[in-house]
Image (cartoon, helix red, strand yellow):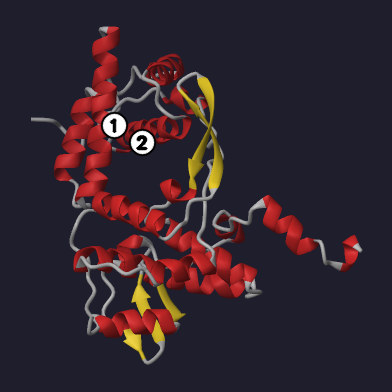
């Protein structure tokens, strides 16, 4: 039996055993626990490949760099490696808080986030998606939920559980699941029409994976197929490839679309932040995805450029 809450700084613990035990005891949702089990699996594969056993105090800066190299050799994307390493680092910090001996030199290793190609859906694209004739009711529900996200700025965890209890006339009031912040958002005619169609109950109970697969197909059907140049690092190589816009659409594009369209409509950032629940402009502006060509066209008529 693991001494999971040890307070003796001289005591060490096998790292993957700690992470698996942490997941077993965690009260968080299954997605959270699955994330850390995956991290433990990657660390176990690294141990097996190198023929070592990693203890709480043996994961130093040198071993951290070797672990990153191991992940690169698996041909993973840069940001995936960053997420995995950040998760490992969090677990070792937690071991320290639990009283185990930890070599904190791994803190010297930091992986910067690589800017990724992210898209948003413009209002005409959202209208085309809304106008699609969809026979399958379950697929239509996915489209309609996604549109609610696009017109409210809610995260998937919130717009997938919205119902009449969240409405006060034309205002949506909901406590966000991720941050616990209460937001109040005006419901436009699209949102009100969709909710009326389902008698106020449009809760989604299937998997997020299924949702993302379906929404890509629906966006393709709606003709959301502009070519997008995607650049990223995979393994040790820089990759450049052309993708269709619908291939880059997932559940979180809804929130990004809302923030960008509201900003382009001239709503002040501070007011949009009250709707989205963002606490800082720095985090908010990460959601604003104005294409350079679109930006140049908009500014062409600005007095400064005349």
Give me the residue at 37% from left, 84% from top: 192
Would you name the residue on which mark 1 appears?
A: 39
Q: Quadrant of residue 8?
A: top left
Residue 103 in picture, x, y percent from top left: 39, 22
Residue 128 appearing in the image: yes
The residue lying at 28 percent from left, 25 percent from top is 42
Q: Rounded to the nearest whole Å, what is the CA distance between mark 2 and mark 1?
A: 7 Å
The crowding category of the residue bearing disc 2, from other C-alpha atoms within 10 Å (few below 14, some 14 to 19, many at least 20), is some
Callout 2: helix, strand or loop? helix
Disc assigned to residue 65: none
Q: Is residue 247 above or below residue 138?
A: above
**Residue 54 seen in this snapshot:** no
Q: Nearer the viewer, residue 58 or 158?
A: 158
Q: Nearer the viewer, residue 44 or 206?
A: 206
Q: Are marks 2 and 1 in contact (CB under 8 Å)?
A: yes
Residue under pointer 2: 87
Left or right of 98 on screen, residue 109: right
Answer with left or right where residue 30 lies relative to residue 153: left
Query: Height in image: 59 above or below 244?
Result: above
Percent across and percent down for residue 290 are 63, 56
Query: Quick one: label 2 or label 1, which is nearer the N terminus?
Result: 1
Expressed as whole percent of the image width and height from the top left, the position of residue 36 reads: 26, 37
Q: How many marks?
A: 2
Q: Quadrant of the C terminus?
A: bottom right
Name the residue at the right extreme. Answer: 306
């Amino acid at each position: 039996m693991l001494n999971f809450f040890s307070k003796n700084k001289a005591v060490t613990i096998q790292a993957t055993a700690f992470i698996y035990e942490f997941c077993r005891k965690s009260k968080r949702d299954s997605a959270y626990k699955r994330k850390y089990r995956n991290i433990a699996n990657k660390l176990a594969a690294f141990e097996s490949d190198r023929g070592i056993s990693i203890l709480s105090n043996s994961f130093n800066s040198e071993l951290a760099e070797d672990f990153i190299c191991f992940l690169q050799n698996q041909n993973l994307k840069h940001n995936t490696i960053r997420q995995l390493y950040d998760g490992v680092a969090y677990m070792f910090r937690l071991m320290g808080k639990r009283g185990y001996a930890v070599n904190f030199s791994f803190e010297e290793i930091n992986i910067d986030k690589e800017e990724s190609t992210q898209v948003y859906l413009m209002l005409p694209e959202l209208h085309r998606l809304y106008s699609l004739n969809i026979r399958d009711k379950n697929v239509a529900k996915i489209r309609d939920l996604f549109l609610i996200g696009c017109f409210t700025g809610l995260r998937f965890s919130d717009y997938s559980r919205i119902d009449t209890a969240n409405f006060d006339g034309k205002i949506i009031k909901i406590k966000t699941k991720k941050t616990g912040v209460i937001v109040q958002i005006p419901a436009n005619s699209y949102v009100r029409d969709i909710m009326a169609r389902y008698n106020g109950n449009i809760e989604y109970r299937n998997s997020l994976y299924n949702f993302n697969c379906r929404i890509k197909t629906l966006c393709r059907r709606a003709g959301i197929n502009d070519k997008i140049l995607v650049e990223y690092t995979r393994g040790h190589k820089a990759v450049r490839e052309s993708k269709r816009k619908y291939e880059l659409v997932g559940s979180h594009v809804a929130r990004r679309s809302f923030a960008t369209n509201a900003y382009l409509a001239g709503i002040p950032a501070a007011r949009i932040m009250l709707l989205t629940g963002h606490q800082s402009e720095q985090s908010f502006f990460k959601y604003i995805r104005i294409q350079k060509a679109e930006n140049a066209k908009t500014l062409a008529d600005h007095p400064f450029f005349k």
